[in-house]
Amino acid sequence: MATLTICSWNVNGLRASLKSGEFQRWLMEVKPDVVGLQEVKAAPGQAEDCWTALGYECHWHPAERAGYSGALLLSRPKPDAVRIGLGDPDFDVEGRVIQADYGDLTVVTSYFPNAGRGVERMDYKLRFYASFLDMVDRLVAAGRHVVFMGDFNVAHTEMDVARPQEALKGTGFLPEERAWLDRIAEHGYADTFRRQHPDLRDVYSYWDAWRDRRARNVGWRIDYVFVDEALMPRVKRSFIQSEYMSSDHCPVGIELEV
């Protein structure tokens, strides 16, 4: 079997990551086959193309609002088909989802909404979860395997956040948000990192810039790669690459036998 390296990274501004050179260094060192980027804050033509020379084709889902949100998929293997968004204009204007098919496998990069702006935005986030899970369920019901990854903007358990009691004071760790990750598991999808590292603590994918929390590893694990349960035995490795520094998030990924 061949192995695909599939990675996700909230770059928190693609142009800034490119300017620092860290994104290019990561692409050349890790050599991922499929990359899902979130919060790119750019549209086609607004960021220097470093990926074509490295053998990637690109697919964008920019937000309608300039400098906000946005998703980008880079792929060495040519997808059989690419679909943009969830098919709901209320969500798709924010540039959050790209789906790519490779044989019987669908890879999805997703940037879930942050609920930090009040009750209305929390409702939006929870409706997004419901729409997204319905989309994934329909893919599996049609006989496809799925990998879905991205910034989910929620830590699942106390193992996934450095300071649980502090985290409960804001969004991203509320019971109604965490319940959606329970529901994803109940629908037959595996959190690849936690499945392979059930007891590993103090490993995070996001650090608030406030008071230099990254240097002190006061973080959250809110970036995930999920697969359908039937695909989990083919996940050779699941990893978090905290050594790459150009964003407040770091890359996460899997090596998948195909």
Image (spheres, rainbow, N blue to C red):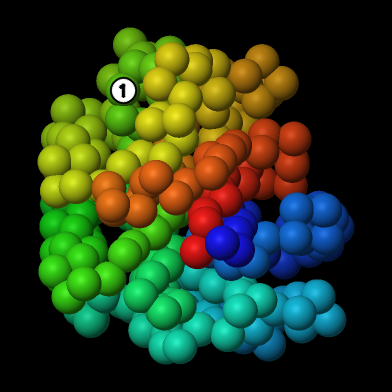
- For the point 49% across and 15% down, the residue is 201
Secondary element at tag 1? loop
Q: Residue at x 57, y 50 (%)?
A: 255
Q: Does 115 sit left or right of 54 as displayed?
A: left
Q: Is residue 81 left or right of residue 255?
A: left
> In this figure, which residue is indicated by the disc labeled 1?
157
For the point 35% across and 53% down, the residue is: 231
Q: Say if residue 214 shows up in the picture.
A: yes
Q: Position of residue 222 (x, y in %)?
A: 43, 38
Q: Quadrant of residue 155?
A: top left
Above or below 198: residue 189: below
Identify the image quadrant of residue 211: top right
> For this view, does 57 lie left or right of residue 82?
right
Q: Report x, y in % for residue 26.
A: 77, 54
Farthest-out residue, front:
1
Q: Residue at x 38, y 82 (%)?
A: 84
Judge by depth and name the residue closer to the eye, 170 or 106: 106
Quarter holding residue 236: top right
Task: Report crowding for label 1: few under 14, some 14 to 19, many 20 or more residues within 10 A (C-alpha).
Answer: some
- Mark yes or no: residue 96 visible: no
